[in-house]
Amino acid sequence: MDYRPWTIDPKTMAEEEIAPQPHNYNEDNIRSLDWKEHIRMRPGMYIGKLGDGSAYDDGIYVLVKEIIDNSIDEHVMGYGKRIDIKISDKKVTVRDYGRGIPLGKVIDCVSKINTGGKYDSKAFQKSVGLNGVGTKAVNALSYNFVVQSVRDGKMKVAEFEKGELINDSPITDTDERNGTTMTFVPDDTIFKNYHFIPEFLENQIWNYAYLNAKLGLYFNGTKFYSENGLLDLLLNKTDPDTLRYPIVHLKGEDIEIALTHGNSYGEEYYSFVNGQYTTQGGTHLSAFREAVVKTVREFFKKDFDAADVRTAIIGAISVRVQEPVFESQTKTKLGSINMAAEGPTVRGFILDFVKKELDDYLHKHPEVADAMQRRITQSERERKEIAGIKKLANQRAKKANLHNKKLRDCRMHLDDGKTEEKYNSTLFITEGDSASGSITKARDVQTQAVFSLRGKPLNCFGLTKKVVYENEEFNLLQHALNIEDGIDYLRYNRVVIATDADVDGMHIRLLLLTFFLQFFPDLVRQGHVYILETPLFRVRNKKETIYCYTDEERQNAIAKLGVKPEITRFKGLGEISPDEFGQFIGEDMRLSPILLTKETSIQNLLNYYMGKNTPERQLFIIDNLKVEKDIVNEVPA
């Protein structure tokens, strides 16, 4: 790049004003895009980030949600008690048994922006999709999209390819039940290397079940059904042995809440608006958090610190808002101020409900009130115990952050405005200087940061949060992530553990996961923690190089390249050159998300893998040990 000194000459400036430079900006530069072109050119405006399916909020799951939302809206309005969902490797089919789209408007409803039945508040008073965009976005971003509507013995089918109508079938007679079926295949030129992760889909469908009691959802033949709404949600998300008191479940018109306290650090919330899971919260969640603290203070007549009341809380809230306003098309954060045009504010509505209903509940159940107070005072005591060391540790971290040799930061962070690129912000946690050196040289400095460990971190299982401040490495890591007071201001969307594919590397993975699960479980629950998959083998000849992540891939590569290719086994990340590493952390990066299923108990998990039950783990290894023979079938010349 040619850098030249820049000086200001008033005479030159005057001449430039008189004789402006020629330009090529004319009518030919102005373009008008039709609806599908705009969606395909700017998909992030409609579905958030694209991704490859390795994160729960990647685009392919938003496509599934947009279609199911329409079926849910039909159920909410009293039409249809069953939804069938079938998802294979690439193909998605959703069938509801509602009224069906009016046959004369089937094509318009899936291919004309701002067309739909939800603009009439009387027809869909408290719907999720109000702007007529969702289904059209799915259509435009799908390689193939088919819509079928059945109404009173008549059926209409239309087929699209990348938003373009390719088959407009005439209306025919049918004996099928009323309802709508939509089938689509996401376009793999937009969602590159995408794959559906069943656990993400199951969580998505369970949320629909919890929020729509007595609706039957059938996902690939398995029934998802809830009788008790948010009570069932918290029962499935928690370990009964760790709860300090039975779940408090309260319902009113347009609002439902459930809450309890556990033993973990941090806060855990599930918030919903009109059946939509608002992963980033919004005005309703802020009001709920405020209302709980205010009610608890007034009930116990003590000015508890808000952090002490909220520590270890597990809560869920669902509200129904007329014509809700979300902060983006993906509807992950509520922005509505009022419950309805002439109704109360969201904050006032929730504060009034929680103040009355929770206060009444605590008066009627003194044993719950006593258990809640014990949990709050425990949090207060623990906070005060670490106050001194926390202040000292934060002072050290502040100084270290000015010259933090462990962190090679990037330019873009998750809390940087509304740019889509923030979702690519990644922190790689590596072991040793050699591994971090390769990643640092190969990384994208715009979105990828590196935090280097000096060796194996401390096994913090069973320790209190005091160790996070006493241990310099843990303290620097929590400050690099900005998660000391929760994950609301997390600096990186993806926290990627990048260790060697050997025993020591696996051990470091476990130690880091223990740290996050023990002290920052929300980071894992919200889908921010991943394992970096790097190739185990490089198989090459003079013409081609193939990187293999499994032994099966290695065998296939050997068969493809022919006789006696050169085979390299990568034992450590430091053995991979920066040029090669760039391929593994670029567009085709393979990440394995750390998932917590509804059957997972964090305490039991850590007890087994990180506790003092060494003989039990030894027996497990002996019983499950597999010996593999390295057999390579040579390809004849």
Image (cartoon, helix red, strand yellow):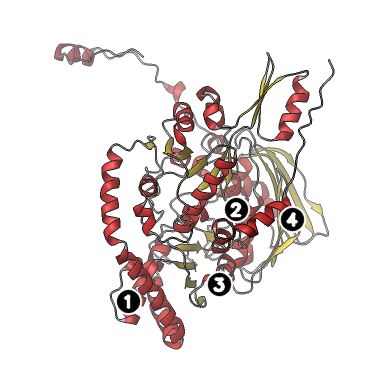
Q: Earlier in the sequence, mark 3 or mark 1?
A: 3
Q: Are marks 4 and 2 in contact (CB under 8 Å)?
A: no
Farthest residue, direction left: 10
Q: Earlier in the sequence, mark 1 or mark 2?
A: 2
Q: Please, is residue 162 above or below residue 221 in the view?
A: above
Q: Which mark is residue 297?
A: 1
User: Is 34 left or right of 166, judged from the image as shown?
Assistant: left
Residue 70 seen anywhere in this rendered image of the structure = no
Amino acid beneath label 1: Arg
Nearest-to-viewer mark from 3 and 1: 3
The residue at which mark 3 appears reads as 241
Mark 4 and mark 2: Cα distance apart in space: 16 Å
Q: Nearer the viewer, mark 2 or mark 3?
A: 3
| Residue matched to label 2 | 65
Task: Give the mark, 2 or 3, whose residue is nearer the N terminus.
Answer: 2
- Of residue 62 and residue 525, the one placed in the foreground of this image is 525
Quadrant (top left, top right, bottom left, bottom right) of the N terminus: top left
Of circles 1 and 2, which is in front? 1
Question: Residue 470 location in percent, x, y?
Answer: 34, 53
Q: In this rendering, which labeled residue sits more in front, label 3 or label 4?
A: 3
Image point (60%, 74%), residue name: 228
